[in-house]
Image: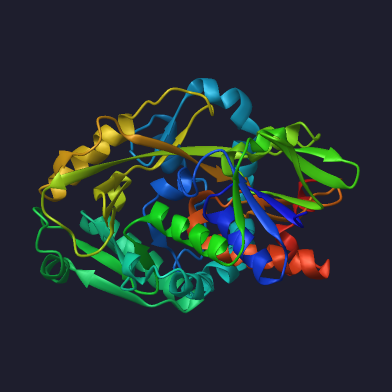
């Protein structure tokens, strides 16, 4: 009989399985699909060691009006989503107050600072070095005013958290990225971050490593989880698969499962879109077009263009207006080529209002553990928070109490 069922085979779940396995636990990884096929597949492929300060809700009037009236491309929202998202949105707004955001960032920076070091041994053991680049990424600014503001902010973050940064002027950026069609004001090159040319492939490589070390991946519906006395079980074709512990690492679907157990998780759902293009010019490094809320990442499947956040119901049909704008912005920057997919890919980022993931023991159920809510950084932080969770499961002591699910009460 296994010791632990890990529900969810994205980067967070697979990393959890590996961390528990390294402690000598017998682990079964449970998902309805193959590892790395959801949000862990569709991101920009960045391991963001520089992301010391999580994305805050805009609080100044100009930014609020820009968001409300959808004047930018970084945020879109559906009105019908606000009925069930107002609570996490309000919590997000409150947590983004300067003093509180500063305190949250102190905790967040502890996680991002070690992210590449926690990925490194898994990358090596999984034989996935060919998927990784260690030369950072760039935030690019088109206008002088935005560049000056962005560079000042980046330099402050670099000093405060001891992060390597190169601020590039227009000529330096043009020399580094000769494929750019327009003259930009400059860029901030974050040097400590890594990039991956196949995020889903890296997650699958970690899952293959887990299996090679004796683990097992089981296709099953995690929604069938139930408590049977002191055990937790899920339904499989031959009956029920049980273990003493269950870790919920289902990303945006976690609250739906936990609601059945009486937990009301105020999760904010941020959808995002991407599409691949082939036949155009290439960038040397991943890039964020700051003013247009558009990310551009070279991938094995083609040149990936990604959007900002969309607030929508979990079952809402796609509304890829941001993807249309992102493609337009990308074509202004370089010769993009033609789309690979008939329609854009769509995924959902699971964000907690206080911008910190839920990592630790469930407040009211013995043997149940939470591991989700990483927002934009599940791919970055999966191995890091997995190590923290494994430590708590082994020692019964939370190494970072501020991540504990008990804060929900």
Q: Residue furthest front?
A: 238
Say left or right for 309 vs 239: left
| Position of residue 48 measured from the top left corner of the image (x, y, whole percent) | 44, 64
- Residue 130 visible in the displayed image: yes
Q: Is residue 42 found left or right of 19 in the rendered image? A: left
Which of the 4 quarters of the picture holds residue 163? bottom left
Residue 207 coordinates in the image, percent (x, y): 52, 58
Q: Quadrant of the C terminus?
A: top right
**The N terminus, quarter of image:** bottom right
The residue most toward the top is 80
Q: Quadrant of residue 62?
A: top left
Which is more toward the observer, 285 or 310?
Answer: 285
Which residue is at 12% across, 65% downward?
Answer: 174
Q: Residue furthest right?
A: 229
Q: For the image shown, how many numbered marks are present on the structure?
A: 0
User: Which of the 4 image quarters holds residue 23?
Assistant: bottom right
- The colour style of the image is rainbow
| Image spot of residue 323 (x, y percent) | 29, 35
- Which residue is nearer to you in this view: 16 or 358? 16
> Is residue 290 found left or right of 51 in the rendered image?
left
Residue shown at 31%/73% (left/top)? 135
The answer to whether residue 398 is visible is no
In the picture shown, does residue 202 fall above or below 79? below
In the depicted view, which residue is nearer to us: 42 or 408?
42
Above or below, 358 relative to 92? below
Q: Residue at x 64, y 66 (%)?
A: 19
Image coordinates for residue 148, horizontal then vertical, percent: 29, 63
Q: In this rendering, is residue 8 above or below 393?
A: above
Residue placed most toward the observer, 321 or 233: 233
Image check: 399 left or right of 19? right
């Amino acid at each position: 009989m296994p010791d632990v069922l890990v529900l969810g085979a994205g980067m967070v779940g697979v990393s959890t399985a590996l961390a528990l396995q390294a402690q000598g636990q017998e682990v079964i990884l449970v998902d309805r699909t193959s590892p790395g096929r959801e949000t862990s597949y569709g991101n920009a492929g960045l391991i963001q060691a520089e992301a010391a300060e999580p994305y805050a809700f805009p609080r100044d009037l100009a930014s609020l009006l820009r968001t409300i009236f959808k004047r930018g491309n970084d945020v879109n929202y559906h009105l019908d989503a606000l009925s069930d998202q107002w609570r996490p949105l309000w919590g997000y707004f409150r947590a983004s107050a300067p003093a509180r955001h500063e305190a949250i960032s102190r905790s967040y920076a502890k996680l991002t600072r070690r992210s590449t070091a926690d990925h490194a041994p898994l990358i090596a053991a999984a034989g996935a070095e060919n998927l990784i680049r260690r030369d950072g990424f760039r935030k690019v600014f088109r206008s002088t005013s935005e560049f000056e503001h962005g560079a000042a902010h980046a330099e402050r973050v670099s000093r405060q958290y001891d992060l390597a940064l190169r601020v590039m002027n227009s000529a330096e950026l043009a020399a580094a990225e000769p494929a750019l069609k327009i003259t930009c004001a400059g860029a901030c090159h974050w040097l400590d971050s890594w990039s991956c040319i196949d995020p889903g492939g890296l997650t699958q490589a970690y899952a293959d490593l887990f299996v090679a070390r004796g683990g097992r991946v089981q296709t099953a519906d995690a929604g069938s989880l139930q408590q049977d006395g002191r055990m937790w079980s899920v339904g499989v074709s031959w009956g029920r698969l049980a273990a003493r512990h269950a870790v919920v690492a289902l990303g945006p679907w976690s609250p739906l499962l936990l609601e059945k157990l009486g937990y009301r998780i105020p999760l904010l759902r941020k959808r995002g879109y991407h599409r691949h293009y082939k036949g155009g010019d290439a960038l040397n490094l991943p890039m964020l077009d700051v003013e247009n809320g558009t990310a551009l990442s070279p991938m094995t499947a083609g040149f990936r263009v990604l959007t900002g956040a969309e607030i929508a119901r979990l079952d809402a049909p796609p509304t890829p207006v941001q993807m249309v704008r992102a493609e337009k912005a990308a074509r202004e920057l370089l010769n993009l080529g033609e789309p690979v997919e008939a329609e854009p890919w769509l995924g959902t980022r699971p964000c907690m209002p206080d911008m910190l993931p839920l990592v630790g023991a469930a407040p009211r159920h013995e043997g149940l553990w939470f591991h989700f809510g990483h927002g934009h950084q599940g791919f970055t932080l999966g191995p890091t928070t997995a190590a923290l969770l494994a430590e708590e499961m082994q020692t019964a002591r939370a190494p970072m109490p501020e991540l504990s699910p008990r804060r929900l009460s």
